[in-house]
Image: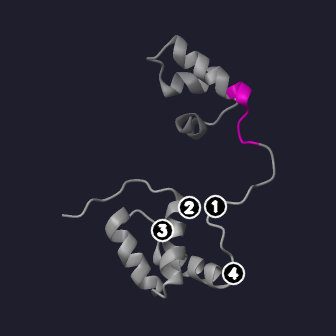
Amino acid sequence: MELLLAAPARCEVRAVIRFLNAKGVKPIEIHRQYTKVYGESCMDVKNVRKWCREFTAGHMEIHDEERSGRPSISDKTVAKVEKIMRQDRRITLDDLCILVPEVFRSTIVGL
C-alpha cells in the first residue's frame, strides 16, 4: 500500500524532477513516479518536460524567483480582517465582504 503525500511544495516537486533528470530518467517516467507518490493533482507531464529542459540547459534554481510590484493586499487590511474575525468568530464571508469592501471575496478566502 502506497502512502500519498498531500500538497507538496512546488520546490519539492521541482527538486524531485531535477534529481531524476540528472540521473537520466525520461520526463514521462518522472511524471509517473511522482504521480504515484503525490497523486494526480500535481504538475502535468507538459510542465515536467519544461522543467527537465530548464535543468538540462543549466537553470538549477528550484525556488520561485522574487517578483516585483506591490503586494496584492496590505498588512493593514489583513490586520483589519483578522480583528473583525477575532471579534466575531461566527461572522460569515458575506458579512466580511460588506465590512471590508476593498478586498475581493476570493482574497478573503485565502487569508
For label 4, count other residues whose C-alpha is less than 10 Å away and answer few (under 14), some (14-19) or many (20+).
few
Residue 68 is left or right of residue 100, and the answer is right
Point out the tag, 2 or 3, that comes first from the N-terminus: 2
Location of residue 95 in the rendering, given as x and y in whole percent from the top left corner? 54, 21
Residue 76 sits inside the magenta stretch:
yes
How far, Cα to Cα, is label 4 from label 2? 17 Å
Residue 25 is left or right of residue 67, and the answer is left
Residue drawn 43% across the image and 54% down it: 7
Point out the tag, 1 or 3, that comes first from the N-terminus: 3
Q: Which residues are magenta?
A: 71-77
Q: Using the rendered view, name the quadrant where residue 41 is placed.
A: bottom left
Check disc 2 and report its element: helix, strand or loop.
Answer: helix
How far, Cα to Cα, is label 1 from label 4? 15 Å
For label 2, count other residues whose C-alpha is less than 10 Å away and answer few (under 14), some (14-19) or many (20+).
few
Check disc 3 and report its element: helix, strand or loop.
Answer: loop
Residue 81 sits inside the magenta stretch:
no
Which residue bears the numbered disc 1?
63
Which residue bears the numbered disc 3?
43
Give the answer, above or below, for where 83 lies relative to 76.
above
Point out the tag, 3 or 4, that comes first from the N-terminus: 3
Which residue bears the numbered disc 4?
58
Give the answer, above or below, for where 111 lies relative to 65.
above
Indicate how the structure is coloured in the image.
Answer: one colour
Considering every residue shown, the one lying at the far right of the view is 69
Location of residue 49 in the rendering, given as x and y in whole percent from the top left corner? 54, 81
Point out the tag, 4 or 2, that comes first from the N-terminus: 2
